Image (cartoon, rainbow, N blue to C red):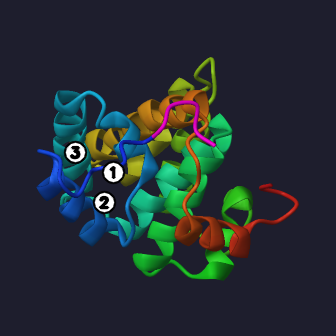
Amino acid sequence: MSRITPIPDYETSELAPLFKQAEKWMGFQPNDGLIMAHKPNLLISFFSLAKAVYDEGYIDAGLKRMIGHISSLSAGCEYCSAHTAFSAKKSGISEEKMKSLWNFQTSPLFSDKERSALNIALKSGMVPNQVSDSDFEDLKTHFCDAAIVEIMGVISLFGFLNRWNSTFKTELEVVPKKAYESIKTIDNA
């Protein structure tokens, strides 16, 4: 159970249109948003940020979800790891690839370009940040500056969400929980 109760009346609240959009976008009603709704302006601003991060750009939707997933795994946030596992599947990432994600450095399922982005996600999700100049130079060989900003947007969005959901112990919804359980391995559990 979450440390703060999600708002119960979201369908009749002033935020109902946002929640309807979130459910359409995600396929379920996210409990972290229902907790955030206790401060409506925070939820409205967060929703705008998440939309900007996930808008079409230089990085495809599947890689964005894998970046969010590995960043969340490295931060130890099961809630966000489950959400990103679910959304990665929705974005066309295979279960086999998701099961191999923790071993992206050596798995043949990942390109050098993906490895570079996932390496940054893994190391920047740690505290303290473990990204080296060498890691960043490698990233620059695969991505333009705007794409790197997009990658960091995903990582930073999940930096916020990882802290939020881990601290509140946000209750995991059934849909993402099933997706996460289907890809958990001993390596990434």
On screen, residue 69 versus residue 106, left or right, reads left
Q: Position of residue 170 (x, y in %)?
A: 55, 42
Looking at the image, do the residues carrying marks 2 and 1 touch, with CB atoms under 8 Å apart?
yes
Which residue is disc 3 drawn over?
47
Which residue is disc 1 drawn over?
143
Looking at the image, do the residues carrying marks 3 and 2 touch, with CB atoms under 8 Å apart?
no
Can you tell which mark lies on residue 59? Answer: 2
Separation of residues labelled 2 and 1 (CA atoms): 9 Å
Image depth: mark 3 or mark 2 in front? 3
On screen, residue 4 versus residue 100, left or right, reads left
> Callout 1: 10 Å neighbours few (<14), some, many (20+)?
some
Q: Nearer the viewer, residue 155 or 142?
A: 155
Instruction: Say which element carries label 2.
Output: loop
> Callout 3: 10 Å neighbours few (<14), some, many (20+)?
some
Q: Which of 25 and 104 is in front in this view?
A: 25
Separation of residues labelled 3 and 1 (CA atoms): 26 Å
* N-terminal-most mark, 3 or 2: 3
**Which quadrant of the view contains residue 77?**
top right
The residue positioned farthest toward the right in the image shown: 186
Give amino acid for label 2.
Answer: Ile
What is the magenta range? 1-5
Q: Position of residue 172 (x, y in %)?
A: 58, 54
Residue shown at the point (25%, 71%) measured from the top left: 24
